[in-house]
Image (cartoon, rainbow, N blue to C red):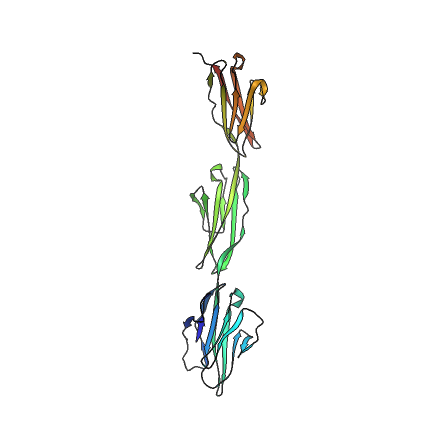
Amino acid sequence: MVFLGMKDRKAAGLPVRSQGESQSDNKQMDNITIRQGETLFLSCSQGDFVTHTAWLNRSSILYAGEDKWSVDPRVSLVTLNQDEFTIKIEDVDLTDEGQYICAVQTSSRPRTTSVHIIVQVPPKIVNLSKDLVVNEGSNVTLMCLANGKPEPAIGWRMLSPSDDSLSSDSEVLEIPFISRYRAGVYECTASNDIAVDTQTVELTVNYPPSVSDGRDVGVTLGQRGVLQCEADAVPEADFEWYRDDRRIFNGFDGIEIEDAGAFSKLTFFNVSEADYGNYTCVAMNKLGSANTSIILYGKFH
C-alpha cells in the first residue's frame, strides 16, 4: 500500500488502491498527485519473512532498509518494522516527479510495488510587459507569459478604469490605434487548478493639449480680477499668457500667474482701465499646443 501525505499532516496519508491483483508479485498502484511544496509519504507493507527492503526513485536507491542512500536532506525514514516501510519527501518539487518502487525480498521470492508521482505547480507569471508610455494613435501589444502545471490559462483585462471590451484570453493583448481613453491599469491573470497569479501593467497615453473655452470676466475698476484657463493634456501642459502679441510674465505690472496641474490663473489685484482687453492662454506639451481667448471687461454699477 502506498500513501500520500500533505504538508503539515502527520504520517497518515491518503490510501491508494492497487490496480492489479493482491497476490501479484509486482503491483502498479494508482498515480498520486501532489502539489509543489507539500510533503509526500510513501509507504509499502512488509509482511513476514522479509529479508531486505528498499525504496527507489527511478534507478536511484533512496533507502535500503534503515540505510539512507539518498544525499537529499528532504528525504527521511518515518517507519520501518514488520508491518510497513515508510519514507517521506519534504518540499516536493518537479524534479521529484516520476516512478517510485518499493522492492521487498522475502525468503521465498522478491516483490515490488510501484507508484507514479505527479507534481502540480501553481502558476507564476515569469515574463510581463513593462509599464508603457506611448503616444495616442500608436499600436500597443501587451505580453504575459507564465509557468505552471497543469499549464495555466492566461487572460488580460483592463482593470482601472474597468472596461470589459478590452480583454483577451491569450498571452497577448493587442490595442490598435490606442486612444487617451484606453490609458490605465491592465491586469494579466494566470490560473490553473491549483492557484491564480496576477500582475499589472500601467499604460500611459500621451496626447496634445485641448483647452476649454475661456469665460470672459467683468471686473469693476480697482477690484480683483481672475482669468482662468484649463487644459487636458498628457504630459501636463505648460501655460503661457499673452496680451495681444505680448507675453505676460509672473509679477509683471502687478499680475500674478499661478499654474496648478491642468489649470492656470492670471490674477489682477487692482484692475485699471489699461488692464481691460483681450488675453490669450496657450497650453503646450511636446505633442502640440492649443489656446483660448478671454476678455477682461469693465463692470459698472
Tally of numbered discs = 0
**What percent of the width, then of the height, locates residue 79?**
48, 76
Relative image position of residue 270 (x, y in whole percent): 52, 16
Decide: is 281 above or below 150: above
Taking depth in this image into account, of 157 and 202 the one nearest to the observer is 202
Residue extending farthest bottom: 108
Q: Quadrant of the C terminus?
A: top left
Q: Identify the residue at horizontal 50%, vertical 25% (top origin).
A: 229
**Pick the front one: 143 or 61:** 61
Locate residue 47: give its quadrant.
bottom left
Q: Which quadrant is home to the N terminus?
A: bottom left
Please tell me which residue is depicted at 53% across the width and 75% down the height of the picture.
Answer: 56
- 132 left or right of 29 in image: right
Where residue 210 appears, as percent x and y from the top left, is 50, 29
- Can you give x and y, in whole percent of width and height, for residue 28 in the image? 45, 75
Residue shown at the point (53%, 15%) measured from the top left: 275
